[in-house]
Amino acid sequence: MLFLKSRVEEDLEKIRLANLPHENLNEKSNEQEELKLEKNDIPAIILAVLSLILPYFAAFVAIMACVVFLLGYFY
């Protein structure tokens, strides 16, 4: 919890920008917001993608193995 200070400060800055009048908002909106990944974000993204793809890939491989087995068994 102690290391989340930068994230808290970023959130406070976003809240301040959201509450600014429209004149000041246009000046501040020109700043490009960068994607700031933290230490464990990349492994979490990889794990999320694998958890979505792996079950379908495993089912496809199992079905293909059954088809090959049945073709070999009957011919």
Image: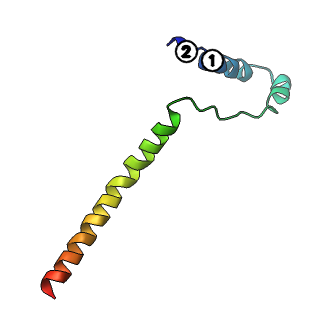
Identify the residue at image location x=32%, y=54%.
Answer: 55
Mark 1, secondary structure of its residue: helix
Q: Nearer the viewer, residue 31 or 45?
A: 45
The image shows residue 61, relative to residue 51, as above or below, that is: below
The front one of 24 and 72 is 72
In this figure, which residue is indicated by the disc labeled 2?
3
Question: Does residue 7 sit above or below 53 in this rendering?
Answer: above
Label 1 CA crowd tier, 10 Å (few <14, some 14–19, many 20+): few
Residue at 44% x, 48% y is: 49
Q: Residue furthest left?
A: 73
**Are the residues flagged by discs 1 and 2 in contact, CB closer than 8 Å?**
yes
Circle 1 residue = 6
* Residue found 34% across the figure and 58% down from its top: 56
Question: Foreground: 27 or 31?
Answer: 31
User: Quick check: 41 above or below 68?
Assistant: above
Q: Please name the residue shown 59% across and 14% down the image.
A: 5
Label 2 residue SS: helix
Instruction: Judge from the rendering whether residue 50 lies leftward or rightward of residue 64; answer left or right.
Output: right
Task: Describe residue 3's horizontal placement relative to residue 48 as left or right.
Answer: right
Q: CA distance from mark 1 to mark 2?
A: 7 Å
The residue lying furthest to the top in this view is 2
- In x, y percent, where is residue 11? 63, 20
Amino acid type at mark 2: Phe
Report the amino acid beneath label 1.
Ser
Counting every numbered tag in the picture gives 2
Residue 4 in the image: x percent, y percent?
Answer: 55, 17
Which quadrant of the rendered structure holds the C terminus? bottom left
